[in-house]
Image: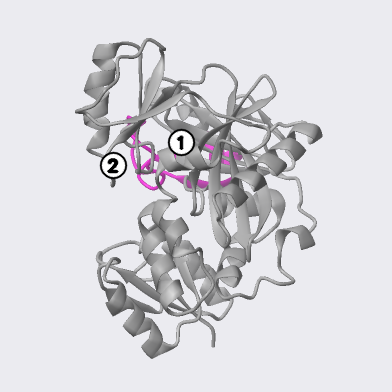
């Protein structure tokens, strides 16, 4: 029997465990949180700190694990170390060590043809340059879920937010960059295998805009012309190659302004907010979670995305928050529509969104042959 090590025990670990069970693959999960959501879904759970690499490797060797999967930004580097020590498929350790650093990702992709970059700086709260280009956006060098992100318009705001943002970063420093006004944000789901990137889906993002740029919803497939979709596929593939991401999923965020593609950030893990699952599987027909598992086992041959005829159905999610409270009436009555795939209700009133928090918000997921119209859903 094939066996995979799942590093982390959150939402995507649960998704992996459920799919692995369908595939008759045994799951071994490592995390320091014994109360997390995936614990009751995996076959074996080990309460081990994810940075205790020697201990995890010893367990993996003892049970003959033959695949390792990272589930969040925090687990990318540990997963690569474990895979390397066990001679399993994975990203190179030196790549995984640096892939969560937003500044280094910008530096490494500067020469990608067809990709534009905003003006950017790396700084600390003790070393903040005097800048005159506003608005700017401040980001932790390494953090997820839109934590610590803020658009600023003055030097005083910049100095305040650099200090605040730095508290969220797992490595010292923040990224300050020109805020890209106008255009439309997208994210791109990909799966790399043995050095070859496969672009699976492009998602249109619905965001709150400045100052926090929070994500309020997602639509698939993105409303791109065939020519622009080809350009996005080529540019994002070249980004992955420039960053030397050779194995596993990646969630790349871009913005398109007047036909030009700008990089926002790259995350070498599955997309959250239900993007990788279930949206990508619903809209394309490709079982990307299965692909992620098979890639970790070195068994993706014959199951690559390009071998499947990717469908074109419409899928998306809307989070019901204070920022888009006008959708609450639709949320309250969505059961009567055939496009409803899932409704998740945790409160009677819309919550205030502070950072991306897919599991603790009201939301609905739609799935239909018909296209989204603005912020509503087409009726049947």
Residue depicted at x 31% and y 11%: 154
Res. 7 in view: no
Question: Mark 1 or 2, which is nearer the eye?
Answer: 2
Residue 8 spot, x, y in % from top left: 36, 63
Tag shown at residue 95: none
Disc 1/disc 2 C-alpha distance (Å): 26 Å
Q: Residues within 10 Å of mark 1 (few under 14, many from 20)?
A: many
Residue depicted at x 71% and y 68%: 303
Would you identify the image quadrant in which residue 52 lies? bottom left
Residue depicted at x 71% and y 72%: 301
Q: Tell me how the rendering is colored.
A: one colour
Label 2: which residue? Answer: 169
- Say above or below: 5 vs 270: below
Would you identify the image quadrant in which residue 152 lies? top left
Res. 13 in view: yes
Return the disc, 1 or 2, that comes first in the chain's sequence. 2
Look at the image and give the residue range highlighted in magenta: 333-362
State the quadrant of the N terminus. bottom right
Label 1: which residue? Answer: 319
Would you identify the image quadrant in which residue 263 lies? top right
- Say above or below: 310 vs 380: below
Residue depicted at x 25% and y 31%: 124
Q: Main secondary structure of the magenta part?
A: loop
Residue 4 spot, x, y in % from top left: 47, 76
């Amino acid at each position: 029997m094939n066996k995979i090590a799942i590093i982390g025990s959150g939402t995507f670990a649960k998704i992996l465990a459920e799919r692995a069970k369908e595939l008759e693959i045994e799951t071994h999960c490592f995390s320091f949180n014994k109360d997390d959501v995936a614990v009751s879904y995996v076959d074996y759970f080990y309460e081990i700190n994810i940075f205790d690499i020697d201990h995890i490797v010893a367990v993996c060797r003892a049970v003959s694990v033959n695949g390792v999967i990272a589930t969040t930004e925090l687990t990318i580097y540990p997963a690569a170390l474990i895979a390397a020590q066990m001679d399993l498929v994975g990203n190179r350790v030196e790549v995984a060590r640096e892939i969560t650093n937003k500044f280094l990702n910008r530096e490494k992709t500067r020469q990608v043809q067809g990709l534009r970059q905003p003006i950017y700086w790396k700084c600390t709260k003790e070393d903040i340059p005097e800048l005159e280009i506003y608005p700017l956006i401040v980001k932790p060098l390494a953090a997820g879920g839109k934590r610590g992100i803020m658009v600023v318009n003055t030097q005083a705001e910049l100095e305040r937010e650099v200090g605040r943002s730095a508290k969220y970063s797992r490595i010292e420093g923040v990224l300050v960059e020109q805020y890209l006004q106008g255009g439309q944000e997208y994210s791109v789901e990909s799966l790399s295998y043995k050095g070859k990137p496969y672009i699976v889906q492009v998602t249109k993002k619905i965001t709150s805009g400045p100052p926090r740029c929070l994500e309020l919803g997602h639509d698939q497939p993105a409303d791109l012309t065939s020519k622009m979709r080809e350009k996005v596929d080529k540019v994002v593939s070249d980004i992955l190659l420039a960053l030397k991401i050779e194995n596993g999923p990646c969630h790349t965020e871009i913005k398109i302004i007047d036909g030009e593609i700008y990089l926002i950030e790259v995350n070498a893990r599955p997309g959250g907010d239900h993007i990788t699952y279930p949206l990508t599987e619903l809209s394309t027909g490709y079982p990307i979670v299965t692909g992620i598992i098979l890639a970790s086992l070195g068994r993706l041959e014959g199951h690559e995305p390009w071998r499947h005829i990717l469908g074109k159905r419409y899928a998306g999610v809307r989070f019901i928050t204070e920022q888009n409270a006008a959708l609450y009436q639709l949320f309250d009555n969505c059961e009567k529509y055939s496009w409803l795939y899932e409704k998740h209700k945790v409160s009677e009133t819309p919550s205030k969104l502070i950072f991306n928090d897919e599991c603790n918000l009201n939301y609905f997921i739609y799935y239909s042959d018909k296209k989204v119209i603005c912020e509503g859903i087409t009726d049947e």
